[in-house]
Structures are given as C-alpha cells and as structure tokens.
Amino acid sequence: MAQKPSIPKGTRDFSPSEVIKRNYIIDIVKTHFQTFGFQPIETPSFENSDTLLGKYGEEGDRLIFKILNSGDFLRKVDDVTYSAKNANTIAAKISEKALRYDLTVPFARYVVMHQNEIDFPFKRCQIQPVWRADRPQKGRFREFYQCDADVVGANSLLQEVEFIQLYDAVFTNLKLEGVTIKLNNRKILAGIAEVIGAENNLINFTVALDKLDKIGEEGVKKEMLEKGISQVSIDKASPLFSLSGSNIEQLDALQQLLASSEIGSKGVEELRFIFEAVAAVGLQSAQLAIDVTLARGLNYYTGAIFEVAAPEGVKMGSIGGGGRYDDLTGIFGLKDVSGVGISFGLDRIYLVLEELNLFPPAIDQSLEVLCVNFGSKEALAALQLVTKLRKSGVKADLYPSAAKMQKQMKYANNRNVPYVILIGEKELENASFVVKNMKEGTQKEYNLQQPEDFIASLK
C-alpha cells in the first residue's frame, strides 16, 4: 500500500482561494511600492553559505537551512573531523550553499556586486520567499514570503519618515485600521547598555530584551543573567520595562537617563526628529508609539528600528518590521553605504485579515460565467460565446463534457459562479442564450450574435 504523502512541517499548500487572497495583499503592497518610487529586483533562492552565515547572530545562524553539496559530499570529511562530531565543522565541509534567511543580506550582496550599475540613492523592493529552520507555530512558518522595501545610499532620517508613511498607506488600503508602528533606536539600546555597565555585552542584552513580549520580564532577566550580564546592570535597566507616558514624555525621560551617553543621546535625538516629522505630515490610520524594549535581534541594525503590531484584540506577532543598517554592505567590502528598510509579513497579514473578515466579499470568485454543456453542437456555440466574453474581460468557462445537468449546476454552485448560461437546442434555433442568475434564481434571454447587452450588465 502506497504511503500517504505529506509536506514538511512549517510549509503549506495553498488553495485557489488562498492564493487569490495572498495576491490581493501582494498587489496592494506592490502598488504602494511603485507609488513611493521603489524599483523591483529578485535574487536567487539560495546563496553561498559565507554570504549568509555570521550576519544574523548566533541564533539566526542556527535557523539557516544548509544545502548539501552534490555528489559524494562525505568524501571531503576526514576521519578525525568526522569522529569529533562537531556539526559546524562538518557542515563547512559538506555544505557550501544555503537557502536565504531573509531578503536584506542578499540585497546588500546585490548592491556590492552591481554598484556600478545602480543610481544612488537606490530604492529597491522585493517580494520573494525565504526559509528559516524555526519551530512552526501560529503565524510562524519555515517557508514564507517577505515583502521588502529598502533605500541605500542616503542617510537622511526622512527615509524613516517615508517608511512609516508607506506602512500607513498599505494598511489603510487593506482596511486594517488600528495597527501600531513601534519605534526604537539601536543607539538608544547601546546607550542604555553603556549607562548600566553592560556595553561589552550589547548583543546579548539586545537579543534578550527583544524577547520581552514572548518570555516576559522575568524570562528576559533570567536570560540576561545566563548571558553574563550582572544583576546590578539588570536592576539598573528595570525601569525600562515599565516606561510610560506619551511618546514625547518617554523621549524626555530617555534623554535624562542617557544624558551621560553620547551615542544614547544621539539615538533619542534621531527618534525625536522622526516623531516630529511624522506629526507634521500626518498618518491616515496607523498609530505611532515608542517602545524602548524593541530590539529587533538582528545584529546589522544601527539606528531606528520598526515593528508593526496588529490591531488590539488580534493575537498575532509582528506583521512588519525593519530598521536602519548604516554599513551592511561593508561586510562585503563596500564601506560607508547607509541603508534603511522595512518588511511586510505577508503570511501574518493574511491571517489578521482573515480573522477580522477584511477581505473583499467576492475576492475568491474566480469565475463569473459558466456555460452548461448540452452536447457537441451546443458546446461549440457556447465556446464561441465564451471566447467573446473572455475578450471582453469576463471570467468565463464552458463545462468540458455533456454531463448531467445536476452535476454541472452543482459544479457552478461549488465554484460560487453568479451566472450560468444555457444554450440548448431551442436556443440554437433562436440564435439566443439564456442567463440564469444563481443568487436570485431569475433568467433572461439575450441575442447570441450580440452579447454586448449581457456584458454591459456585468459592469
């Protein structure tokens, strides 16, 4: 007996309805990418391992899917290395490529390789799948799409303001009101680490802090202790967990707290500019909030960082995020090229829209008209009509065989087809066709040679 097929955990098949809904989100995102002047690029699904490894921190590296070399890959592993059972050492010998973890590092590689072809500042957008060997859970998959927009070659904070506007425009267009765009700055986090005496442990400090919404305050403090951050430093940082007040009040409090830190003060200054500029241009539906515990665990961020939270009441992780990375291209040899970018979490946005019933009612109506098949002669006339309808932009089809009427009507109902066309022997004689409105149960006859009246009624 054949084994029942399956797919890997953390991956999914998508039904026609799901694909249509996903494309609805992608089309809106693409439209706004274009409106804001971003240019599309694409990069390979896998990269050389040395392009990806070491760019996401220790935790990120563990989540990268490695691709085995082709052929007898174990031949390159000597007995001593194999006996040591060190996964990292063996992996370096049997795997030279890996599936991309995100779109940002491959983009940095792209910029370096194509720097002589690019006009700076370069505004790029990219919508492609990425892979992470993560533990699957609601809203977290091992294969998922990212919708990214980045600007490289311009260090103006107006770029951050523009990305906030882009988030606001897309979510407003999706009718997803009440999202909150959270902001922080890695310079502020560096300043906090300096003030509390943990500047030599900045990465562990930010990685732990970034998990506040997942493991809570006590969990974060425990992880900091485990990573070598002293209890004294943790106690000094404790007020950050309960910072409150308006955005400006929180910035004022941070300014006082970080007065002795040059880098921390610079971060506060940058955030204040962004908040004031956004207030000047205004937002349509999104809310803007400072979140000093926001860390965005990726090591390459250097300035402002973003994270978008779903509307209150929806249990979902972030549905977007990003930040400034002032020298990411430097890891590939191109120094002093500033960059900033954001990403839309397509899969999570889909789940939120589904939960809030925000997809257009007829979005998955893939067929407007179905012609019933009464036999070869009638089917040929129906196919000629279907051809005219399609040329007019109507989503039309002909049932492929002269099956029982009940079966064909059931098919139309299952496909949620609003109009069924009947061309039987009588209609052929009269050079006409009958349209049945499936919702209302009414019928109307039209001239077979002049279907324009019917087409007009669909507009």
Image (cartoon, rainbow, N blue to C red):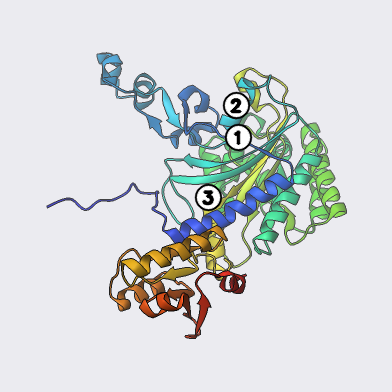
SS class, disc 2: helix
Give the CA distance from mark 3 to mark 2. Answer: 39 Å
Compare residues 187 and 197 and report the one nearer the observer: 187
Q: Name the residue that disc number 2 marks.
A: 110
The disc, 2 or 1, on the residue closer to the chain's N-terminal end is 1
**Residue 68 place in picture, x, y as percent:** 34, 27
- The C terminus lies in which quarter of the figure? bottom right
The disc, 3 or 2, on the residue closer to the chain's N-terminal end is 2
Image quarter of residue 371: bottom left
Query: Residue sitting at 47 percent across and 24 percent down?
Result: 48
Identity, as a three-letter code, of the amino acid under mark 3 = Gly
Identity, as a three-letter code, of the amino acid under mark 1 = Ile
Identity, as a three-letter code, of the amino acid under mark 2 = Tyr
Q: Is residue 24 left or right of residue 93?
A: right
Q: Name the residue that disc number 3 marks.
A: 219
**Residue 423 place in picture, x, y as percent:** 41, 74
> Are the residues flagged by discs 2 and 1 in contact, CB closer than 8 Å?
yes
Give the CA distance from mark 2 to mark 1. Answer: 9 Å
SS class, disc 1: loop
Q: Is residue 246 left or right of residue 62?
A: right
Q: Is residue 208 left or right of residue 411?
A: right
Q: Is residue 180 above or below residue 240?
A: below
Q: Is residue 404 above or below residue 145?
A: below
Q: Is residue 253 above or below residue 45?
A: below
Q: Is residue 273 left or right of residue 342?
A: right
Question: From this viewpoint, which residue is outermost toward the right?
Answer: 280
Compare residues 109 and 183 and report the one nearer the observer: 109
Q: Name the residue that disc number 1 marks.
A: 41
